[in-house]
Image: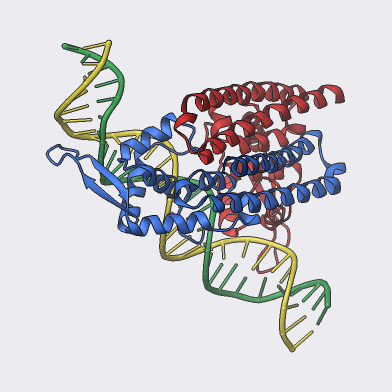
Chain colours: A red, B blue, C green, D yellow
Amino acid sequence: MKNQSGLTTLSLAIVGLISQRAMTGYDLKKVFEETPMGHFSSSPGAIYPALERLSKAGLIDGEVESAHALRPRLAYRLTDIGREALGKHLAQSVTRRDVVWNLEEMILRFAFMTPALRRGESVRFLKEFYNEVNGYAKELKAHLDRVQDSFTEEQSLALEHGIAKYEMNANWSQRALKRLSRGK
Amino acid sequence: MKNQSGLTTLSLAIVGLISQRAMTGYDLKKVFEETPMGHFSSSPGAIYPALERLSKAGLIDGEVESAHALRPRLAYRLTDIGREALGKHLAQSVTRRDVVWNLEEMILRFAFMTPALRRGESVRFLKEFYNEVNGYAKELKAHLDRVQDSFTEEQSLALEHGIAKYEMNANWSQRALKRLSRGK
DNA sequence: AATTTCATGTAACCAGTTACATGATTCA
DNA sequence: TGAATCATGTAACTGGTTACATGAAATT
């Protein structure tokens, strides 16, 4: 459990995908294999136990589609509880901790916002996201100024990589903000 | 074990730091807490077991500094085996898989290259890194072209985030390459 | 006198990894 | 007919998380 709402990154990906259409474990596996959707293991040893946990927690519900077969195809869809949990998870505000430790998950959250939340929530997310990544980029720059004299060239470059990463995120969120405002 | 040479990302960080100067578990904890060195847990429950594993594997060696105290201060330094293992780990070539699944670890590798490897190795690393991130950026663009009609605005933006990330990495590695060539 | 810092560890838990297993159906 | 795909699962292992524990030394 990576955060207060109790969804791991993999669980979020699963719940988010299932929120769009009913899916079996195998469907999820294929999405993780064939699309650049975050980077998740497509191993059955991760997916099926995760589905079982979410099912036990009442967030998703599996419907048997071919009861006669040896391995009945189990198509999962979101329950009302699941839809609410997803909404709450996505609506959490963006903290410094989030962008430092779970940046990729933040993008995953953002990807699932429509139609789970209202458009205004995506905008709010982007503004908060921008503030945090921009703030952290400044922190990193200040740190570089302090330490670069004692650093090897590679170490300086590695830290500059971090700065460039957060600046790229700041730029992206600004662009995204414009696109969302323009679009509606 | 995340890759063929058997070092997890945390182990690499520990071995890399210890290669620069002898360090205790507490020293490592402070580095992880106070500097933006990758993003590692500063929890003793991760660090001390990792030190023990590395010690058992013969990569590092702990020297008791204050035997009289209740908690003797254990300063670790690299063994010859450890130095060799670090060198081999850092000298691995960069694969597509690496930049897709372990990009942050690649930067960590790069940061420790001096003085563990010769400068030429850093240059080779950057060239390979550039090829892979650039290639993957192109893959992502092609994917976006294929799927964007069926995507929500947020999903398109999330994928564009991925593209921007790999383009930023391509730019960074080009800049880094120039700096290393110029500098020596 | 009280709090923070130094310093190392353990225990319970949990999620993800690799590898294995089964067998029907579809395709070359 | 042999291989690939569909489809779901289990078992052993591993490493990281959170929380707890201890107690000396330094600082406020």
Q: Within the image, what quadrant is residue A88 found in?
A: top right
Q: Is residue C23 above or below residue B74?
A: below
Q: How many marks?
A: 0
Residue B179 visible? The answer is yes
Q: Quadrant of the C terminus of chain A?
A: top right
Residue B3 screen position, x and y as percent: 52, 58
User: Is B21 on the left or on the right of A107, as rendered?
Assistant: left
User: Is D9 on the left or on the right of B7, as rendered?
Assistant: right
Tell me which residue sits at (44%, 32%) in the image.
A150
Q: Is residue B33 above or below residue B183?
A: above
Q: Within the image, what quadrant is residue B97 found in?
A: bottom right
Residue B135 screen position, x and y as percent: 74, 52
Task: Return the residue nearer the eye: A94 or B112.
Answer: B112
Task: Return the residue nearer the eye: A67 or A109.
Answer: A109
Tell me which residue sits at (65%, 66%) in the image.
A71
Residue B1 visible? The answer is no
User: Is C7 on the left or on the right of B147, as rendered?
Assistant: left
